[in-house]
Amino acid sequence: MCRALIACLALILSFAANPAWAQMRWHDTLVNFATLPAGVRFPEGITANPATGDIYVATFDTIGPNPNKLLRYSRHGQLVGSRTIGTPMLGLAFGPSDSKVYITNFNQSKIQRVASDLDGTIEDVATLPLKIGAPANRIEGNPDGSSDTIQFGSVGFPAPNAMVFDRSGNLYVSDSFQGAIYRIDNTQGCIAPCGVTTVLHHPLLATAGFPPFGANGLALSKDELTLFVANTGDDRVLKVDLAASPVSVSVFTESINGADGIAFDDSGILWVAANQADEIVGLNAAGRVVAKIGAFDKISADGAPEGLLFPASLVLVGREVYITNLALPLTSAVGDEPEEDVTRWTVSRFRLLPNRRQ
């Protein structure tokens, strides 16, 4: 009897330490897809040309003196194009009908675009609304039944971050500082400056947390009735009901440490870059974690991170998942972050297995 009890306890502990999702194989080995050119730092935004498999990477270098770059890689990781951009960039998106690369210009609060070969004029598409103000106060309940009131202060300017196109060619844009989601209708056909509609300005889209970025990564459900939004500082993924009148927002899942870029795969799993956990998290339709991929290992001899370090954005091309390692130090203290030791920046990749299941 005693032996049977011990065996049962051992089995229970084994499953507790290794939940079902951890025992499933979701992907092959995480590898380095590309190392950025020397002196090019802090890769943030990423998108892909689905027809060619080319990968585009944008840098978010706010501390200079290095210029920010928009980089183009072949599907084999070869650098085939580069364009110097005057200011830091956060998000990228690829136009489904005009085959242009769309850019969120952080300093100028603009959406811009350039040809897929990165040549020619960088066009201004739209400027985001300035100073729409802080969202309303937010009431957060506590486990003991009490509640806290969070009051947001507006920083005075927008922070255009992530973008996603719907099938009609409308472009959704997140504003990380003002707690808002915007839409630019018929983005690829409108005459610039294109009109910008505020879809939602809500306290759930803002943050009092750290890193100080609220609404961030965006992904549309298959039927495009729901817009999923990462809130980085709150460690949450939200869902916006676009079909509701008025448009509403609720919490989809919590405790995703530094939820940043997000994207769906063809099986309906929502992949989230958890930038403060150095991992990619897979969520099922109920918002439950079903997969965790990656970890930070060390800084290699050439100054590049091995594994994931501050994964910021991700893009899927078929079953291939590409991730930017922002590797940006967040504090002024010396010696407390591995990001301080990075001298070469990378993009990682893994491949989802064809027989994965929820």
Image (tube, grey):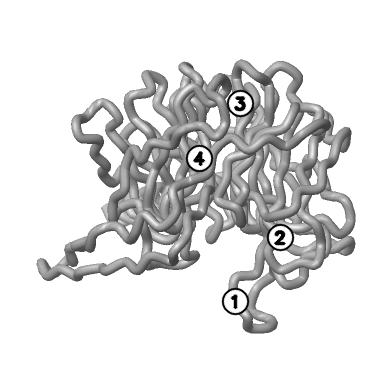
Disc nearer the start of the sequence (2/4): 2
Count of labels in the image:
4
The quadrant the C terminus occupies is top left
Quick one: label 1, few (<14), some, or many (20+) residues within 10 Å? Answer: few
Residue beneath label 2, please? 61
Q: Distance between the residues labelled 4 and 1?
A: 25 Å
Relative to 358, say whether 4 is above or below. below
Q: How far apart are marks 2 and 3 (CA)?
A: 34 Å
Describe the element under mark 1 as helix, strand or loop: loop
Q: Are marks 1 and 2 in contact (CB under 8 Å)?
A: no
Describe the element under mark 2 as helix, strand or loop: loop
Q: Distance between the residues labelled 3 and 1?
A: 38 Å
Q: Distance between the residues labelled 3 and 4?
A: 19 Å
Name the residue located 80 percent from the left edge and 67 percent from the top edge.
65
Q: Where is residue 31 in the image (x, y as percent from the top left)?
A: 75, 42
Name the residue located 47 percent from the left edge and 59 percent from the top edge.
157
Residue beneath label 4, please? 262
Residue beneath label 1, please? 331
Disc nearer the start of the sequence (3/1): 1
Res. 353 mark: 3
Describe the element under mark 4 as helix, strand or loop: strand
Q: Which amino acid does label 1 sit on?
A: Thr
Name the residue located 64 percent from the left edge and 45 percent from the top edge.
45
Quick one: label 4, few (<14), some, or many (20+) residues within 10 Å? Answer: many
Describe the element under mark 3 as helix, strand or loop: loop
Q: Where is residue 346 in the image (x, y as percent from the top left)?
A: 77, 50
